[in-house]
């Protein structure tokens, strides 16, 4: 049954790709060497490639099953970018670029999808349609998914469904976390400028104190998740930055607040923004100061379609080493695959890559982040099996 599990030279190639990409991490929209590596691998296999959103790479594979030519297209997506983090590692494949590191596993995602291209090419007689391979730039907060959509992803691929995975250090190697409906959170960022009027710390009556006003805002924001959103809907409002003043006896002119909000539905996301703005304005009015709110919508919730999670669960038994993890797993982390799954039904799942034996024990975005490379062939097999099964499901 292990038809898509790379072994021997095919396995060595996936690991080598992952290490090469890890050694040469590139930030959002600067994935030049990574894209070139992807292209040279795909060209070597006989694929034609096109660029999308600058450093993104798109390729297609049409199956040779009897009805493949008239069959639909499904999309497989991997992200390619690294993070502005200084790596702490003694491993031979540690980053050679100071202050830049693959600390989220996107090196693994890219290597996995390169491996999927090889495996599906070798088994294209099983494909009852066409597979589009998307190597997406700039997942880490820079809007790569939106850019590929703006660059015509839907029209250029005519894909009817999308699949992808994230290696996940918080789960043991091989554990697949596949959840129907909302799976990852929306993520927004806010900054609030509170302007008052400074004065002597001993003569507060002639000042308009922005510090007290900002402190009330921080406290009142805590009521959004407890009093304004549906108690059955998850919501987070975190004030992560607060700054004002310097001297111990001077009331400053202004104070600044900043933070992030998370939710699992667009309706909750709307409530959070509206309440945050209203509380800032109302509190400012109460204390005679002015509040300017900059609220940036970054990512919508990532929502999986039950049909496609079902297909993902159905292929788990075909992949040696992969087991189904607890049902209903969700995280307040965010992912811009959410925008692709807003445009196309599909599934995004986690594949455990945590293993203390190889030091894969750190959370994502940690300077010592590492994945268990044993998860790489499992990822290749999972996505390959999903693509075959998805096209089969569409044909039946
Ligand atoms: Zn990340
Ligand atoms: Zn990531």
Image (spheres, rainbow, N blue to C red):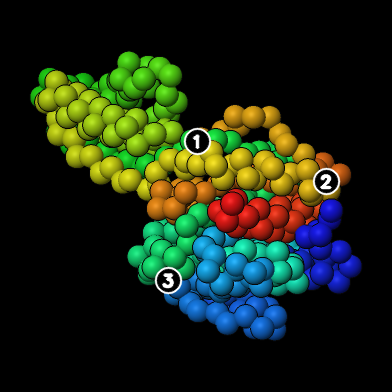
Q: Residue at 37% of width from left, 42% of height from top? A: 188
Disc number for residue 156: 3
Q: Residue at 47% of width from left, 41% of height from top? A: 303
- Horizontal side of 109 relative to 372 (left or right) equals left
Sequence order check, earlier mark of 3 and 2: 3
Q: Residues within 10 Å of mark 3 (few under 14, many from 20)?
A: few
- In three-dimensional space, the C-alpha distance between marks 3 and 2, rounded to whole angstroms, equals 35 Å
- In three-dimensional space, the C-alpha distance between marks 2 and 1, rounded to whole angstroms, equals 26 Å
Instruction: Decide: is 330 above or below 318.
Output: above
* Residue named by callout 1: 181
- Which residue is nearer to you in this view: 19 or 270? 270
Does the numbered disc 3 mark a residue whose Cβ is under 8 Å from ligand 2?
Answer: no
Q: Residues within 10 Å of mark 2 (few under 14, many from 20)?
A: some
Under circle 2, the secondary element is loop
Under circle 3, the secondary element is helix
Q: Position of residue 237 (x, y in %)?
A: 39, 29
Disc number for residue 321: 2
Under circle 1, the secondary element is strand
Q: Residue at 59% of width from left, 29% of height from top? A: 328
């Amino acid at each position: 049954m292990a038809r898509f599990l790379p072994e021997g030279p095919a396995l060595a190639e996936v690991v080598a790709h992952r290490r090469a990409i890890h050694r040469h991490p590139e930030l959002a929209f600067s994935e030049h060497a990574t894209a070139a590596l992807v292209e040279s691998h795909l060209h070597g296999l006989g694929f034609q490639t096109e660029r999308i959103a600058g450093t993104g790479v798109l390729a297609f594979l049409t199956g040779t099953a009897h009805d493949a030519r008239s069959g639909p297209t499904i999309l497989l997506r991997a992200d390619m970018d690294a993070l502005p983090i200084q790596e702490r590692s003694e491993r031979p494949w540690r980053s050679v670029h100071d202050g830049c590191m693959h600390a989220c596993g996107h090196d693994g995602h890219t290597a996995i999808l390169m491996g999927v291209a090889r495996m599906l090419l070798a088994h294209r007689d099983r494909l009852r349609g066409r597979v589009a391979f998307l190597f997406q730039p700039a997942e880490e907060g820079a809007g790569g998914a939106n850019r590929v959509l703006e660059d015509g992803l839907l029209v250029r691929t005519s894909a009817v469904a999308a699949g992808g995975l994230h290696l996940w250090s918080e789960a043991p190697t091989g554990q697949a976390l596949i959840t129907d409906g909302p799976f990852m959170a929306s993520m927004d960022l806010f900054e609030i400028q509170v302007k008052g009027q400074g004065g002597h710390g001993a003569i507060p009556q002639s000042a308009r104190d922005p510090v007290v006003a900002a402190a009330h805002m921080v406290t009142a924001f805590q009521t959004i998740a407890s009093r304004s959103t549906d108690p059955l809907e998850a919501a987070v409002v975190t004030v992560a930055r607060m700054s004002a003043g310097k001297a111990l006896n001077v009331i400053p002119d202004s104070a600044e607040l900043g933070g992030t909000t998370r939710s699992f539905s667009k309706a909750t996301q709307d409530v959070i923004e509206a309440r945050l703005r209203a509380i800032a304005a109302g509190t400012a009015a109460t204390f005679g100061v002015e509040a300017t709110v900059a609220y940036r919508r970054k990512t919508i919730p990532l929502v999986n379609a039950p049909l496609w999670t079902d297909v993902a669960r159905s292929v788990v038994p075909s992949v040696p080493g992969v087991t189904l993890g607890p049902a209903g797993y969700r995280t307040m982390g965010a992912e811009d695959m959410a925008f692709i799954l807003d445009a196309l039904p599909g599934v995004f799942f986690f594949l455990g890559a945590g293993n203390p034996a190889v030091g894969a024990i750190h959370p994502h975005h940690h300077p010592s982040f590492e994945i268990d490379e044993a998860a790489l062939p499992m990822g290749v097999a999972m996505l390959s099996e999903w693509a075959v099964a998805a096209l089969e499901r569409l044909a039946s």
